[in-house]
Every structure is written in C-alpha cells, then in structure tokens.
Image: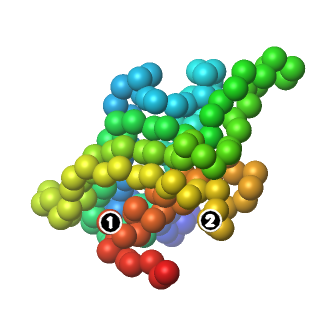
C-alpha cells in the first residue's frame, strides 16, 4: 500500500512539473460585443470565440517550454456574410469570395521568464481565402480564420517561413 502511495505521489509531482514547464497561451477578447462580424445569436458568438481560443491554445503547444503567449483580439470579421434564416432558426453564413474575406486584429506578447521576446499589433487578413486549399475540412466553419491564424503563428511567433 505504501509503495502505491509513493508511486502516486511521484506521478502527481511529475505531472505538476511537466505542466509548469509547458508553454501557455492566454486569449482575451477586448469588447467582443463591438466586433465587426460575429454570429447574431449570443450562443453562436460564444461558440466561435471558444473555438478560436481553443485553436490558439492548441498552436501554443509548438512553443518551447517556458514561453508564454498573450493574445488580445481587438476585432473579428469572419469570412462571408451572415443572413437570417427563419426556416431552422440558425442564421446562414454565405461565403462568396468577394469583399467578404476574414480579418482578425490582435495584439500579442511572447515572453519567457518574464522577459518580452516579441510583441506588437497584427492584422490577419486573407483576400483570397476562397482560392486557397487548406488542411481544414469544408465542414469547419472557421477554416479560413484558422488558416490565417496558422500562417501568422508560424511566421510571426515561431519564425518559420512558408513555402510558395
């Protein structure tokens, strides 16, 4: 019994130390009720912001141990335009590829041991979002936004250049 308790305690300590050494991402939405284009329904707005936060956090797994990234999103204009849909109660977002490209404005700060490594303002936009092939499924309603976030994260935060 004593052996099991010691092993459990050691496993707990290991898990704590691994968590402390891992990178962290914090995402804040500044006045999200004033964003340019999010779904009309409050529950859908919340769902979009949570999905984007989760995606930023997932990308944070690429950061070296000990680095932390704070992102303050100041505006979002999702790809396409939203139109009321009375038949099923859920609004319809239509992507035309014209002047409806996605835009995300944000401020960021990448730190390590309390020291700022990088930071600034960024405007993520993809005017050609309909002509690009991506790794996201067509069923992913935020595929254009996630592709922009990927490119920004890899180039700006990680410093990885993308090929042609």
Q: Say what secondary structure mark 1 lies in.
A: helix
Q: Which mark is residue 115?
A: none
Taking the image as shown, residue 47 lies to the left or right of residue 111, namely right
Image mark count: 2
Which residue position holds label 2? 132
With respect to residue 155, does 80 lie above or below?
above
How many angstroms separate mark 1 from mark 2 (CA)?
22 Å
Left or right? Give the position of 34 relative to 80.
Answer: left
Residue 75's place in the image compared with 143, above or below, is above
Q: Residue furthest top?
A: 86
Q: Bin the neighbour count of mark 2 within 10 Å (Cα to Cα): few under 14, some 14-19, many 20 and up.
A: few
Where in the figure is residue 64, as x and y percent of width and height? 33, 72
Q: Is residue 4 left or right of residue 41?
A: left
Which residue is under mark 1? 157
The percent position of residue 77, horizontal first and vertical second, equals: 49, 38
Indicate how the structure is coloured in the image: rainbow
Residue 50: percent from the left, percent from the top?
54, 39
* In the image, residue 18 above or below residue 29: below
Which label's residue is closer to the chain start, 1 or 2? 2
Taking the spot 25% from the left edge, 59% from the top edge, the residue there is 110
Q: Residue 89: give x, y in percent of width and height.
A: 79, 20
**Residue at the spot 58% in from the left edge and 56% down from the top edge:** 129
Q: Is residue 51 left or right of residue 133?
A: left
**Residue positioned most to the front:** 98
Q: Secondary structure at mark 2?
A: loop
Q: Is residue 79 visible?
A: no
- Can you see residue 118? yes
Q: Who is closer to the viewer here, 157 or 67?
A: 157
Residue at the (52%, 31%) spot, across then down: 37
CB under 8 Å between discs 1 and 2:
no
> Where is residue 13, by image quadrant?
bottom left
**Relative vertical location of residue 16 with respect to residue 105 in this rendering, above or below:** below
């Amino acid at each position: 019994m004593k052996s099991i308790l010691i092993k459990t305690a050691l496993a707990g300590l290991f898990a704590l130390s691994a968590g402390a050494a891992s990178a962290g991402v914090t995402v804040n939405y500044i006045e999200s009720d004033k964003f340019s284009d999010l779904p009309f329904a409050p529950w859908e707005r919340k769902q979009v912001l949570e999905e984007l936060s989760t995606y930023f956090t997932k990308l944070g797994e690429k950061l070296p141990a000990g680095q932390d990234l704070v992102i303050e999103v100041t505006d979002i204009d999702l790809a396409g335009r939203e139109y009321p849909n009375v038949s099923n109660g859920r609004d319809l977002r239509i992507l035309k590829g014209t002047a409806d490209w996605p835009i995300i404005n944000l401020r960021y700060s990448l730190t390590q041991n309390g020291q700022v490594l990088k930071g600034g303002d960024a405007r993520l936009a993809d005017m050609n979002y309909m002509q690009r092939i991506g790794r996201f499924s067509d069923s992913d309603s935020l595929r254009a936004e996630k592709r922009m976030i990927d490119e920004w994260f890899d180039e700006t935060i990680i410093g990885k250049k993308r090929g042609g």
